[in-house]
Amino acid sequence: MSRKNSMQKNVVIIGGEGKLARLFNRELSKLGMSVFSLDKNDWHKADELFAQADAVIVAVPIHLTLDVIARCHQLPVECILADLTSIKSSPLRAMLDIHSGPVLGLHPMFGPDVSDFSHQTIAVCDGREPDKTLWFKQLLKNTGAELYTISASEHDESMTFIQALRHFSTFAYGVHLQQEQADLSSLIKLSSPIYRLELAMVGRLFAQDPELYADIIFSSKSNISMIKRYHQRLGELISLLENKDKAGFINQFSDVGDWFGDDAQRFLKESSAMLDSTQKS
Ligand code: NAD
């Protein structure tokens, strides 16, 4: 590894052979960065790679992240230590503990199947010395990604809704379809584009890595509490049906509509436009 001009930085990705790491390697390389992979059998090269690194990015499975961060104790003081983990509080704390230089928590809000970073959101949690991480944030912006800065705790709270609850209810729906032995080919034939899309959103979960989703859902007690409250609410709502309380159902429906407010109309328009554009492409 050699140092080139000041714009060409050395980036080391730990877990570099993984799905998300390879995507970051490709996008950062396009912008002229020298990207080096350090995967599980490469730790004998770590000292050499770390010595000249401008940024080290941890991109290993969630349940291994803290152990891997603990191995990043000899980075140059100016080097950024960053991670791509889907949860942010515990990795950020661990990075701040192990490295005295700039620290940056990142969560790409997309999977490895995107064609590039254009219009994709990356959540950014500043850890230490944000001024020294500006070059790296600018690099991410240059890929076309949109950065959204948020505290690690707020990020994790939002992920309880966006990821844990969402993925768990999709998981439960998939389990239910399977156990009811639903005739998938018939459901597909009967589906108009909107239902096809909804079915695809369920099916695509099961084409991915179960360990990643297990790690996301099992990552905090508040995820489990949220899912239990959701389960309780389902029970309460089912009693509307059992009591043939159609008026109660309609009242609840209207209350939620009021709560969504203008966003409900906006979402209706947006989703219709998305469906139109997929049908035309
Ligand atoms: P992955 O399983 O595809 O890749 C993980 C890589 O880490 C593998 O190449 C593995 O060999 C390597 N590894 C395992 N132990 C190691 C060790 N001790 N030292 C070095 N390397 C080691 O995982 P992924 O899906 O790319 O996810 C990686 C990270 O990205 C996770 O923290 C995840 O939360 C986050 N993330 C993933 C997605 C996604 O959709 N895949 C989206 C956003 C964030």
Image: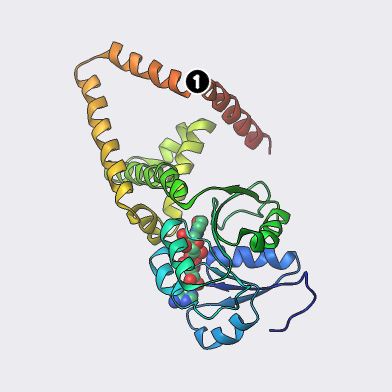
Work out whether residue 73 or residue 34 is closer to the camera in this orientation and state it. Answer: 73
Q: Residue drawn 30% across and 42% down?
A: 227
Image spot of residue 176 (x, y percent): 30, 42
Amino acid on which disc 1 is placed? Gly
Quadrant where the C terminus sits is: top right
Q: Which residue is mark 1?
A: 261
The color scheme shown is rainbow
Q: Residue 85 at what x, y percent from top left?
A: 48, 60
From the viewer's perspective, is 41 left or right of 275? left
Look at 69% across and 65% down and name the residue there.
28
Residue 208 appears in the picture as rendered: yes
- Mark 1 closeness class: few <14, some 14–19, many ≥20 residues within 10 Å: few
In the rendered image, which quarter is residue 97 located in?
bottom left
Judging depth in this view, the residue of 280 and 18 nearest the camera is 18
Q: Quadrant of residue 128?
A: bottom right
Residue shown at 78% from the left, 78% from the top: 4
Which of the 4 image quadrants contains residue 165? top left
Above or below, comparing residue 175 to residue 105 in the picture: above
Residue drawn at point x = 57 percent, y = 30 percent: 271
Quadrant housing the N terminus: bottom right
The image shows residue 110 at horizontal and vertical percentages of 55, 51
Residue 228 placed where, x, y %? 26, 41
- Position of residue 34 relative to residue 110, above or below, is below
Q: Which secondary structure lies at badge 1?
A: loop
